[in-house]
Amino acid sequence: MTVGPFPVIAVIERLRAQAPVLLDVGSAADLETALEQKPTLDAVAFVTAAELGRKPKYTGPLYIQDCDVTVRIVLMVRNYAGQAAGSGAREQMDLEVIPAVRAALLGWTPNDAFDGLNFQAGRDERFAAGFLTTQQVFGTSYRMQQQVKP
């Protein structure tokens, strides 16, 4: 039985339910597109995922391949306090938004086929047009299996 790709919609639903500080959560076609968004709400997230397959194995007619998944949560916060330097946005990001995202996702899995999400990185992208944009990156893995037909 084959598993995959990683269900990004499950992450979106989880963040909508567990991180109410985010006023909107959606997806983007790719990371670059997510980073280029210009939201109309003050705290939003865009979810993307990338997968990388490891070396395949065969057990008789069974094809087995482990796959690593990187789930990227692009966060954008606008806070009018300290607008010139973004200090209000930085404070809200650090005290409210990032902790809510981590609490919602750390160790969580959309189903038994995937390992629990683990934190990999947090990185600031930019402060522009009043928005602080940053990423929270999580990882997981799963196994794909397929009966090879002659």
Image (cartoon, helix red, strand yellow):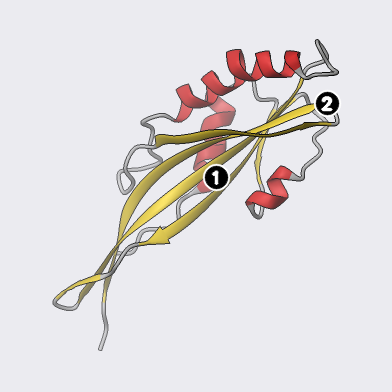
Identify the residue shown where x is 76% and y is 45%.
36
Q: Residues within 10 Å of mark 1 (few under 14, many from 20)?
A: some
Q: Is mark 1 on a helix, strand or loop?
A: helix
Q: Residue at x 29, y 67 (%)?
A: 55
Q: In which quarter of the image is residue 109?
A: top left
* The label number, if any, that marks residue 130 in the structure image: 2
Foreground: 71 or 63?
Answer: 71
The C terminus, quarter of image: bottom left
Query: In which quarter of the view is residue 119 placed?
Result: top left
Q: Is residue 24 above or below residue 53?
A: above
Indicate the amino acid at tag 2.
Answer: Gly
Residue furthest left as drawn: 60
SS label for mark 2: loop
Q: Quadrant of residue 98?
A: top right
Mark 2, other Cα within 10 Å: few <14 / some 14–19 / many ≥20: some
In the displayed orientation, state which residue is furthest to the front. Answer: 85
Image spot of residue 68 (x, y percent)? 38, 53
In this rendering, the answer to whether 84 lies above or below 41 is: above
- Choose between 3 and 127: the one closer to the eye: 127
**As drawn, is 98 to the left or to the right of 33?**
left
Residue at numbered disc 1: 9
Name the residue type under label 1. Ile
Furthest toward the top, the residue is 81
The image's mark for residue 119 is: none
In the rendering, at what x and y percent does residue 22 appear?
A: 65, 25
Asked if the residue under mark 2 is in contact with the one under mark 1, i.e. CB atoms within 8 Å, the reply is no
Q: In this view, does 98 lie to the left or right of 148?
A: right
Judge by depth and name the residue closer to the eye, 19 or 88: 88
